[in-house]
Image: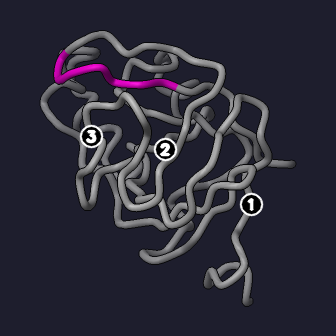
Amino acid sequence: MTARVEHLFIKPARRMPMRATAEVQAVTGQGLEGDAAFGRSRRQVLLVEGEVLDRFHLQPGQTRENVVVRGLRMADLALGSRLAIGPVILEVTGDCTPCRQMDELQPGLQEAIRGKRGILAWVVEGGRIRVGDLVCAAAGSLEADD
């Protein structure tokens, strides 16, 4: 199965509703333009598997993710792995630890989704990300070299 971007979201501010978008500008070393995490060092972009949302009966955007990807198992990505999404290169900075907000969505979700909440990444090479873009291991990534 080919991995693709299924949904894109911008978080205008903390606790504000996510804003769905068809495309977003990723800025090298900064994150996604217009997102509350723009300029942060570790948590610039949050990617979540569409399959995980399905498994927990969650709607896209509910877990505060920026990018929903279908067809890529994120738990298999090691720290430092790189992903190409269109012209953009993202580097995995770690797992996203579920917070108490998950239990506000569904009682017990914080623990149930642990290890499946998604991955955090920072922007190595900027560009435009669009819904429908292919997602694959980038050149120089551990996965691409295997």
Above or below, comparing residue 75 to residue 48 in the picture: below
State the residue at coordinates (69%, 36%).
Answer: 5
Q: Report the span colored magenta.
A: 9-15
The residue where tag 2 is placed is 47
Query: Circle 3 — which element?
Result: loop
Q: CA distance from mark 3 to mark 2?
A: 13 Å
The furthest residue to the right = 1
Mark 1 Cα within 10 Å, few/some/many (few <14, many 20+)?
some
Query: Circle 1 — which element?
Result: strand
Q: CA distance from mark 1 to mark 2?
A: 13 Å
State the residue at coordinates (62%, 49%).
Answer: 127
Magenta span includes 60: no
The furthest residue to the left = 100
Is tag 3's residue or tag 2's residue first in the polypeptide sequence? 3
The image quadrant of residue 76 is: bottom right
Indicate the quadrant containing the C terminus: top left, top right, bottom left or bottom right.
Answer: bottom right
Identify which residue, 35 or 9, lies in the foreground: 35
Identify which residue, 10 or 110, lies in the foreground: 10
Q: CA distance from mark 3 to mark 1?
A: 24 Å
The residue where tag 3 is placed is 37
Is tag 3's residue or tag 1's residue first in the polypeptide sequence? 3
State the residue at coordinates (69%, 29%).
Answer: 6
Query: Circle 2 — which element?
Result: strand
The image quadrant of residue 7 is: top right
Q: Is residue 109 left or right of residue 91?
A: left
Residue 136, numbered label: 1
- Of the residues tagged 3 and 1, which is closer to the observer? 3
